[in-house]
Amino acid sequence: MEFSSIEDIRNRIDQIDSELVKMIAQRGECVKAAAAFKTDHAAVRAPDRVQQVIDKVRNKATEAGLPEEVIEKVWRTMIGAFIDYELEQHNRLQQQKT
């Protein structure tokens, strides 16, 4: 990818950011739906599943030419935020049952 100015780079980053937000919102819908299938907080936290996801994205990062450390930091942060979100959803669903 070649750019002729910093503005070109910033415009492309803005486009990518817009696409990422849409995709992360889709991921959020999946997380919200998953809360209904979880039995307790341990199932929401699911450390083994988190590690599986991290391993997968590290491999994808390598294939894409991105340092694994970068993608792991991004994904761990995103997963942490989504775990908090899913716990909120799970708690809300549990309260509705009572």
Image (cartoon, helix red, strand yellow):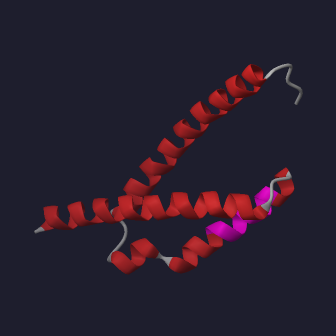
Q: Position of residue 10 (x, y in %)?
A: 69, 27
Asked if residue 57 lies in the magenta stretch, the reply is yes
62 relative to 87 in the view: left or right: right
Asked if residue 71 lies in the magenta stretch, the reply is no
Q: Position of residue 12 (x, y in %)?
A: 71, 27
Q: Position of residue 37 (x, y in %)?
A: 37, 67
Q: Residue at x 62, y 75 (%)?
A: 51
Q: Residue at x 46, y 53 (%)?
A: 30
The quadrant of the rendering that contains the C terminus is bottom left
Q: Residue at x 88, y 30 (%)?
A: 1
Q: Nearer the viewer, residue 70 or 40?
A: 70
Depicted 93 relative to depicted 48: above or below: above
Q: Position of residue 64 (x, y in %)?
A: 83, 51
Magenta part of the chain: 53-61
Q: Which residue, as the protein is rendered here, is positioned at the far right? A: 2
30 relative to 17 in the view: left or right: left
Q: Quadrant of residue 97?
A: bottom left
Q: Quadrant of residue 44?
A: bottom left
Depicted 15 relative to depicted 57: above or below: above
Q: Quadrant of residue 16?
A: top right
Q: Nearer the viewer, residue 72 or 43?
A: 72
- Number of numbered discs present? 0
Q: Nearer the viewer, residue 98 or 12?
A: 12
19 relative to 66 in the view: left or right: left
